[in-house]
Image (cartoon, helix red, strand yellow):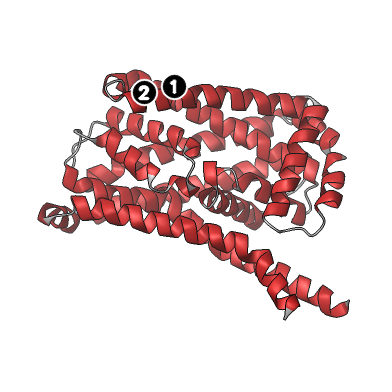
Amino acid sequence: MNANAEKKRRISPQVVRIIIFVALSVLTIGLVLFFTVNKQTVTALKNFDLGYMLVLFGIWAVAFSMDAVSFILYTRGTDAHLKVGASFKAAAYRIFFNLITPFSFGGQPFVIYYLQREGVPPGKGSSIVMVKLIIISGWVLAGAAAGFIFFHNHITKVTALNTLFLVTGLLQVVFIALIIVGLSKPRVMIKIIAAISDLFGRFRLVKNKGRLRHQIIHEAYLAKKSFQAYFRGHFLSFAFGTLAIGIMYCVEVVTLWVIFLGLGVDLPFATGIAIGALLLFLLPVLPTPGAAGLGEALFILLFAGLVPYYLLGIAVVLWRFFYNYLTAMTGAIFSSRLFSKIIVKTEGSGEHA
């Protein structure tokens, strides 16, 4: 009885996070649909060109593939190796755990954990994940700056939106600088990795946090060397990995524009990608898991007055599905298998003991 209770407690934090995210998402999307759907929405859905749906699936496949390719290239840059299948799993885990944790941070520590299971030392895994995070943040920041310049008249009319954008920009710059310093200076990296080991403990993926922290701290200098190697003998891996992330980002930004085209809205291309860039920029700083609720509100604020209100709800659903949910569902399937292996291994160890 006690053993079974302990096993349940080990996996309950993940279950709780998933329930919170799903509940918030269903509630907020349900409310948006309730207040926006009418007969015109139904007509627009009936007239939705299936060709655009195929394009959206293609966009998702390209984004998912480029995310996985970047993992392969950045891993190769550390003189480690990652199989193709494992790279897709790492990409799916990143999105899934980012969705079920506040501020979209849970994916990073879990990917380091997963890479370790695939034979990539924690120090190298930390370098891979942090470099990837820097590059993603760089693309997002550049796209948002261009979007803000193009769309600033609309943003500055809403004080809260303007403030949120400026604060987010400052936080992004500071965040990128801290990661670079952390990878360049081992002492700072040690503190970062120690914090990551605490997150491992919160996810209850490890039994002995102290031992894991001690082990990973010794990998800090390896992380520094791996980071420096990108700019010495492995610059091409770094450059092509950065290009892969750029392609991933660009197709994700285009998603919204394609959705509105499919719904019959003649939204200018520049406007569509500008708003898409601003959405991707602001979502990670929203405190709810997966920005559930707040993301939908932000969506409506940005598109208010630009598209018919009766299309906002269905557009939110389509955008969430192709930008978040499809990859997250893939990550959830992989995670369930991984957690079942962990539980079986734990049970086996307990029986043996």
Q: Tags 2 and 1 in contact by the CB under 8 Å rule? A: yes
The dot on residue 11 is: none
Residue closer to the observer: 155 or 232: 155
From the top left corner, tell me how far across and down residue 267 is, in percent.
Answer: 22, 35
Residue lying at 34% horizontally and 38% vertically, measured from the top left: 298
| Vertical side of 291 occupied by 280: above or below | above
The dot on residue 162 is: 2
Which quadrant of the view contains residue 4?
bottom right
In the image, taking residue 114 as reference, residue 267 lies left or right, namely left
Question: For the residue marked with disc 2, what is the amino acid?
Answer: Asn
Q: Secondary structure at mark 1?
A: helix
Question: For the residue marked with disc 1, what is the amino acid?
Answer: Leu
* Distance between the alpha carbons at the discs numbered 2 and 1: 6 Å
From the top left corner, tell me how far across and down residue 193 is, in percent.
Answer: 76, 39
Which quadrant of the view contains residue 178?
top right
From the top left corner, tell me how far across and down residue 15 is, in percent.
Answer: 56, 63
Residue closer to the observer: 274 or 5: 5
In the image, taking residue 130 as reference, residue 302 lies left or right, namely left
The N terminus sits in image quarter: bottom right
Residue lying at 31% horizontally and 23% vertically, measured from the top left: 151
Residue lying at 47% horizontally and 55% vertically, measured from the top left: 21
Residue closer to the observer: 81 or 333: 333
From the top left corner, tell me how far across and down residue 200 is, in percent.
Answer: 71, 51
